[in-house]
Image (tube, rainbow, N blue to C red):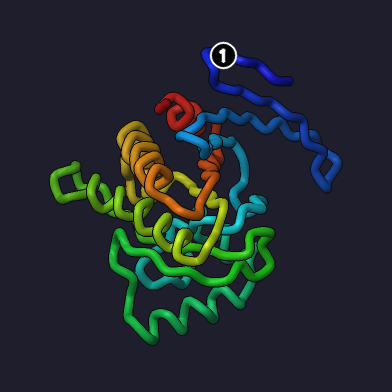
Amino acid sequence: MLLLVSGIRHLASLILGFNQHIYLTIMKEITVGTKKIVFIQGDITQENTDAIVNAANSSLMGGGGVDGAIHRAGGPSIVDECEAIVARQGRLPAGEAVMTTGGKLPARHVIHTVGPIWRGGARDEPETLKNCYINSMKLADEHNLRSVSFPSISTGAYGYPVDAAASVAVEAVKESLSQSTQVEEVHFVLFDETTYRVYASQT
């Protein structure tokens, strides 16, 4: 089903899963010049973009939420690469980003970035969160990637309010897309409907 509303495309598609259950995937798409941002309610580990972004912790060794899901789906090769990165350069500071292969994931690469812990907003959390998106996009550009999928960084265990995080995330990606020489499409893949609706309203 395709609905055109004020020039923005809203798409709802039925997807038959491997377990024979039917899933409803909700999507909204906007354009940034000749490029596009797609908002999806779904599972980021199923994305087949060139890279998916992992909301990692500074040890890069996996954890809960999106981080744990990506490591479980991607398999041990991602952990091995993360261990090598930490051995070479130490723990990853908040706002920075590094890249590994995608292991068993459909995506060819995983970009790992560490979001800020929310402490009320007065400790540079917005700037650090913006850097997560900016530096992930720069890394994708440097590796000639055309498409990237992001989760909602820092809004789980790190406690960043979803409304505030969504505003930072979408504006940072718009800014990066306007300057990017390689990346043409960005997905925001949000696991629950509430988070999806907040992100999709940021346009």
Residue topped by disc 1: 5
Residue 5, horizontal then vertical, whole percent: 56, 13
Q: Amino acid at mark 1?
A: Val
Residue displayed at 56% across by 51% down: 147
Q: Secondary structure at mark 1?
A: strand
Q: Is residue 105 above or below residue 41?
A: below
Residue displayed at 69% across by 59% down: 106
Q: Callout 1: few (<14), some (14-19), or many (20+) C-alpha neighbours within 10 Å?
A: few
Q: Residue furthest right?
A: 20
Locate residue 64 relative to residue 90 in the image: left or right.
right
Q: On the image, which quarter does residue 198 sit in? A: top left
Locate residue 34 relative to residue 90 in the image: left or right.
right
Q: Is residue 156 visible?
A: no
Q: Quadrant of the N terminus?
A: top right
Residue displayed at 19% across by 42% down: 120
Q: Quadrant of the C terminus?
A: top left
